[in-house]
Amino acid sequence: MTVAAAPALPARYQVAGRLAETDDTVTLDLRPVDQPIPPHQPGQFTMLYAPGIGEVPVSISGTGPDLRLVQTVRAVGAVTRALCACRPGRMLGVRGPYGTHWDVAGAAGGDLLIVAGGIGLAPLRGALLTALGHRDQYRRIVVLIGARSPQELIFVRDLGEWRRHGADVELTVDRAAAGWAGHVGVVTQLLARVPVDPGRTTALVCGPEIMMRLTARELLALGVPAARVRVSLERNMRCGVAECGHCQLGPLLLCRDGPVVSYPAAAPLLAIREL
Amino acid sequence: MSGVTPDELGEHAFLRGMTARHLVVLSRASWEAPVRAGQRLFEEGDAAHRFWLLRSGQVALDLHSPGRRGLIVETLGPGDLVGLSWLVPPYHWQFGAAAVQDTVTFELNAIAIRAACEEDPGLGYALLQRVMAAASSRLHATRVRILDLYGAPDAAQDRP
């Protein structure tokens, strides 16, 4: 679902809030200082600029009052470490929004199944909030979240509200100590028990590519139509406007043709060792 | 505890496709057993004289060692088999198990069912196929967990 290209110049945003999700992941609440970026759709990303350090693509996790952006960043390099360290008041540059989106509206009338692994929940949060905002348009809304451990789950504070608004939320982790009330195991193990009608299900999947591949394979085995499985791919997005070519994945330029890609288009690319 | 009919057993995902004759044999060694949250089903090292088919609720397989909090190895839910060691000599549990929430199970007498399998290899083969499917599924899941499914890829640097 392609949307119109956004301006290439960054808009100034100020960090209005910062919430540490885990040891290495932070959610920033960004308030526009001047003209905000154009409206976005769930699944799209922005290029976040830490002045003097660099710019990285970051998915949009939601919006706040006064056209604020909610973006969740995991510290894996120099720029993301700088972004994670930002305190309220700090100025950042924002370009975007870029890329394709989850097409949440396209799932209306059926079941919506959201499967997230690790920080993959960040790009899906906006899709879930959109669907919960139109709860009556969907049959079941099921959210499956996998993480290494309970300490590495993000958006834990939101889970109660999502459930109150009509989502079935299940958590599973790889490792847990006694007292953990969720599941222990891989997220794909939960799929067979999900109370959805596979033929009427749209699945939105985001996480590491190996997780998405295994999840998609399981969904297809359960009878979810391949065209109704969407995954979010990432590569080295730089320009955001499909000009520099850094984010090429086979025939796709992911800053334009992704990050959200239907599984039939993504499947041949997910099994290639180097691309 | 109350008895279980062959039809009720046949509706459980683990036994789906079993012949009516085999379900009758299994039903004679089965009963419905509710398990309260926190109640332990078995302990590591104990003799595996029973096994369970989960109808609702959740059970955690766990491992304990001195000085450490108990570790949950895996959780099992509706449709799952609890217990593999009942079919593998020397029939001792490799892990412990406890209900995480109020759970309803079919409990089966492993000693009686092993004896029935000795008498009827067809029953033994049908059960072995299902236990192997469960074991294979758990082995696959364990392998995937070893892969660190949710970790950042080796090349990850400043991606969203």
Image (tube, coloured by chain):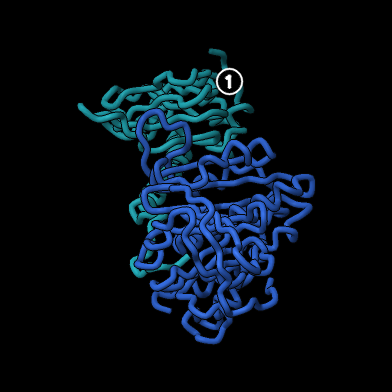
- Residue at the far left: name it: B66
Chain A, hue in figure: blue
Colour of chain B, in one word, is cyan
Residue A167: x %, y % from top left: 65, 41
Question: Quadrant of the rendered structure where residue B91 is?
Answer: top left
Residue B25, percent across and down?
Answer: 52, 25
Task: Estimate the x, y position of residue B153 in percent, counting from the top left.
Answer: 37, 64
The subunit carrying tag 1 is B
Rendered location of residue A190, percent (x, y)? 53, 44
Name which residue lies at 49% across and 53% down.
A27
**Residue A221 visible in the picture:** no
| Residue that appears at 40% across and 51% down | B140
x 67%, y 55%: residue:
A66
- Few, some or many residues within 10 Å of mark 1 (<14, 14–19, 20+): some
Q: Which residue is mark 1?
A: B4
Residue at image location 56% in from the left, 13% down from the top: B2
Instruction: Decide: is A150 above or below A219.
Output: above
- Left or right, B7 with respect to B63, comes to right
Q: Amino acid at mark 1?
A: Val
